[in-house]
Structures are given as structure tokens and as C-alpha cells.
């Protein structure tokens, strides 16, 4: 597996890749993860190769790996892989293509992220850059043997944008039992939350693409309506100060707890001590944190968006509001959840737990392994048995041409669309 983000970085992709790797190892498979260096990375790691990287790229909490192949050659030959799994279309994603081509291996790519929504880390509000990134990512899909989409929404997004590679929907699984072990009382004591208070909680990276200004506005409206309610925010990132300032300006800093980044028991307790999990992001590919919250029996309030709608059932395991709902509508929906009858509340909690069971690690791992076998069996019939150094170099060169062609096509598409916008500025 090659990924641009991995532990100890905290985020959905890092958790997804590490969870998949550990699940495969637990079943007796061999796994080699190629990932960038991150602050706090262990000096010695089993099954992981670290690549030199630029830290905190563009002011984010991400590392930017240097897409090198030659330091991997000895490790790859010793490992003898049967399949390559890329988790990003850039940087180490290109390295994954080179490795697969050179060793005649099938390559699977998981489309984890709506990449075009992260352009603010490089250039503020650049429509040209968004289109370039979108075209690059979609072109990368068609350089792979198979694409994994974490949700049906993302699968439709890819096909609607012309991706022709085979696509299979496989969500990231979670260890339901570990999240269900979180304790409400222990969590409330840990963060000094009143035992009888209604607590709205959020877990995730506190970053601009997560729509957290909207969420803060909605929670402030709700806190005005509910003098005994509290808010628990778990995570860290560039938007933390903005949220803290918003709550402080409204006079609610004493009713909001910021826990920072949590893992293990503390994270499970943070979920468990919430009454409702609130989520306003519209940039997700799957609702992983929603599933984690539901595993603890917490209903969810969220906006209808890709990745989220696959998890949510409105008025069953929580509330799903239209994406265009304003902060006042979000606060009103939270008010409604806070005043559910005891019977309706118990029913919603049971439905949340049932939803989480559908995303268990074992079920999702079974689907991934079946896909691996399907792709590997298909590729094995095409592999050359009499390989030479020249054949290896030729395949690498051909793949390099494919990578450069994808970049050129993406630049051309972005320029063409920008020219069309200049000619027709009122058209979407």
C-alpha cells in the first residue's frame, strides 16, 4: 500500500489505511505500507517504510512525500507483492503506478477524498486549480486496474465525470466493539460535563473544508435556546481558533470543551458521553466518524452530502437536513432531538447501533479481499513469465508516459474550462 498520509497523523484516510493494513495482518496476510515521514513517527516500525517528506505542507497538518521509487526497490523485491493498493492519486500515487508497471502487478486505487475541495491549502478560491486537481484524480483512476469508492455517492461522482475503470463500493470498516466499549459517565467526568446535561459532540479534523464556521453558528444558536446544554469538540487543526473565538464572543466558552486529538479509550468515551453527534461537512467521501458515533449509540445530525447520505436514515438513526439548510434550521433540528420522547430516543439509539454493525471491519475486509482476488486473478493471465531488465525498463517508461499524459490532459482540460468561463461568465 502506498499512501500520502498515515499514522501518527490523525484523519479519516490515515485511520482507513491503518485499519485495513491491520485487518489484513490479523488474517495472516503480508502487508507493506509505504508512507511519508510524520512528526512523531516511530523510529522502528514493522511493515512500514517511511519516505522523506516536507512537513506541514502549505500550513496544513499534512506531510508532502517526495515521490521516489529507487529507495523502495530492494524492499519491494524482498517483500514479493501480489498487488499494489494506492490510496492517493498524486505523489506516492504516481510511485504506486511505477511499481505496479515495473513488477507487472495489478493496482487498485481507493478514491478516499474529494481532492478538488482541498485547493485552499495551495491557492485560495482557485477554480482553475480545482478543475486541474479533479481532472488529474479522475485520469489517475483510469490508469488503475480497479477503483474502490468508499460510498455509492462517490462511485456516481466518478462515473458522472467519465471514469471508465471498474469501480466497486467498499466502505471503510470500523471495530464496532471497541467504540461500543466507550463509557458515558467516565467521559463526562474526564471533561467535567454535568451528568444530566444535553451534550452535542463533534469529532474530526478542525479544518476549513469541514464547514465548521457553519457548525459553530448553529451550536451557538442552540446554546442560546438551551441554557443547560454543552458542546464537546474533539480534534485539532487550523479552524480551532476560529471556533474558540466564536464561542467566546457569544459568551459560551464555559459550556464548550475542546479535547484536542484523542485516540483509544479517550476517543471512545468522547463519543459515548455525547447525546447527539453533529456534523456539517459536505466534503466527505464516506461518513466514517458518523459510523463511529453510531457504534456508541449516538444519533447523528448532519447535512445531506456525499458519503453522509449512505449512513443516515432521516428520523430513524438521526436527522439528515438538506445541504442548503441554514444554521438556524440546523439548530432547530438539534432542538427537536433534544426533546424526543424517551421511547423515540431509545428507538433512534438502537437504529444507530444497527447501522454501525453494517460497517463492521470484518464485513468490509471480506469485500476488499474478494476484490483483491478478482483483480489479481484477472492480471495473472496477462503477466509475462520471461522478464528481463529491458522489459522492466520498457514498462516503466510506458507508465511514465501515461503519467505525463494524464498531467498534460488535466492542464488542457482546466485551461479549456477556464476559457469557456471567460466567454460565458454567467454559466455554472
Image (cartoon, rainbow, N blue to C red):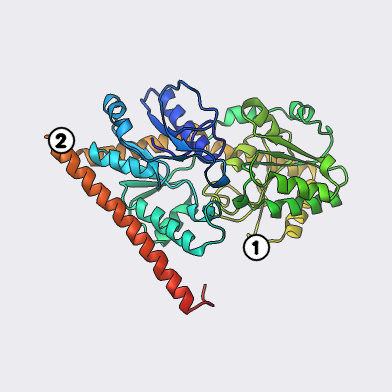
Q: Residues within 10 Å of mark 1 (few under 14, many from 20)?
A: few
Q: Which mark is residue 358?
A: none
Residue 333 higher or lower than 418, as above or below: above
The quarter of the displayed image where residue 265 is located: top right
The answer to which image quadrant residue 412 occupies is bottom left
For the residues carrying marks 1 and 2, which lies nearer the camera in this image?
A: 2
Quadrant in which the N terminus is drawn: top left
The residue wearing badge 1 is 324
Asked if residue 312 lies left or right of residue 73, the reply is right
Image location (x, y in percent) of residue 310: 54, 50
Q: Where residue 13 sits: x, y (%)?
A: 50, 40
For numbered disc 2, what is the local secondary structure? helix
Residue 33 vs residue 314, the one in the foreground: 33
Q: CA distance from mark 1 to mark 2?
A: 57 Å
Residue 60, image x and y in percent? Answer: 57, 44
Residue name at image x 51 percent, y 38 percent: 55
Front one among 230 and 311: 230
Q: Residues within 10 Å of mark 2 (few under 14, many from 20)?
A: few
Q: Earlier in the sequence, mark 1 or mark 2?
A: 1
Q: Residue at x 20, y 44 (%)?
A: 395
- Would you say residue 313 is visible in this rendering? no
Q: Could you say whether the residue bearing mark 1 is in a helix, strand or loop?
A: loop
Residue 129 placement (x, y as % from top left): 47, 60
Q: How many marks?
A: 2
Let me know if residue 344 appears in the view. Answer: yes
Residue labelled with disc 2? 389
Amino acid at each position: 500500500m502506498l499512501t500520502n498520509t498515515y499514522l501518527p497523523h490523525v484523519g479519516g484516510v490515515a485511520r482507513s489505511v491503518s485499519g485495513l493494513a491491520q485487518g489484513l495482518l490479523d488474517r495472516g496476510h503480508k502487508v507493506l505500507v509505504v508512507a511519508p515521514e510524520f512528526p512523531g513517527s516511530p523510529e522502528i516500525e514493522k511493515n512500514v517504510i517511511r519516505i522523506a517528506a516536507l512537513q506541514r505542507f502549505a500550513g496544513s497538518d499534512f506531510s508532502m512525500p517526495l515521490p521516489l521509487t529507487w529507495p523502495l526497490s530492494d524492499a519491494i523485491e524482498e517483500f514479493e507483492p501480489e498487488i499494489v493498493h494506492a490510496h492517493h492519486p498524486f505523489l506516492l500515487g504516481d510511485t504506486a503506478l511505477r511499481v505496479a508497471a515495473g513488477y507487472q502487478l495489478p493496482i487498485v486505487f481507493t478514491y478516499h477524498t474529494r481532492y478538488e475541495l482541498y485547493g485552499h491549502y495551495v491557492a485560495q478560491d482557485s477554480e482553475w486549480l480545482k478543475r486541474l486537481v479533479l481532472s488529474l484524480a479522475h485520469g489517475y483512476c483510469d490508469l488503475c486496474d480497479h477503483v474502490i469508492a468508499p460510498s455509492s455517492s462517490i462511485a456516481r461522482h466518478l462515473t458522472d465525470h467519465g471514469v471508465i475503470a471498474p469501480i466497486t463500493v467498499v466502505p471503510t470498516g470500523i471495530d464496532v466493539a471497541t467504540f461500543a466499549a466507550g463509557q458515558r459517565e467516565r467521559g463526562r467526568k474526564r471533561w467535567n460535563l454535568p451528568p444530566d446535561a444535553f451534550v452535542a459532540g463533534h469529532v474530526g479534523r478542525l479544518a476549513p473544508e469541514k464547514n465548521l464556521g457553519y457548525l459553530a453558528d448553529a451550536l451557538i444558536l442552540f446554546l442560546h435556546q438551551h441554557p443547560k446544554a454543552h458542546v464537546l469538540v474533539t480534534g485539532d487543526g487550523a479552524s480551532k481558533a476560529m471556533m474558540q473565538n466564536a464561542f467566546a464572543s457569544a459568551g459560551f466558552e464555559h459550556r464548550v470543551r475542546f479535547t484536542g486529538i484523542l485516540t483509544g479509550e479517550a476517543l471512545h468515551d468522547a463519543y459515548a458521553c455525547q447525546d447527539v453527534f453533529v456534523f456539517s461537512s459536505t466534503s466527505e467521501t464516506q461518513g466514517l466518524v458518523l459510523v463511529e458515533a453510531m457504534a456508541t449509540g449516538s444519533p447523528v445530525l448532519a447535512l445531506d452530502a456525499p458519503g453522509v447520505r449512505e449512513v443516515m436514515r432521516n428520523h430513524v438513526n438521526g436527522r439528515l437536513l438538506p445541504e442548503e439548510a441554514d444554521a438556524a434550521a440546523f439548530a432547530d433540528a438539534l432542538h427537536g432531538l433534544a426533546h424526543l420522547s424517551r421511547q423515540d430516543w431509545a428507538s433512534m439509539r438502537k437504529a444507530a447501533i444497527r447501522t454501525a454493525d453494517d460497517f463492521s471491519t470484518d464485513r468490509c475486509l471480506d469485500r476488499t479481499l474478494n476484490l483483491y482476488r478478482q483483480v489479481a486473478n484477472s492480471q495473472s493471465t496477462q503477466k509475462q513469465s520471461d522478464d528481463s531488465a529491458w522489459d522492466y525498463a520498457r514498462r516503466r517508461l510506458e507508465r511514465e508516459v501515461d503519467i505525463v499524459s494524464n498531467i498534460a490532459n488535466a492542464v488542457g482540460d482546466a485551461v479549456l474550462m477556464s476559457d469557456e468561463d471567460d466567454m460565458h461568465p454567467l454559466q455554472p
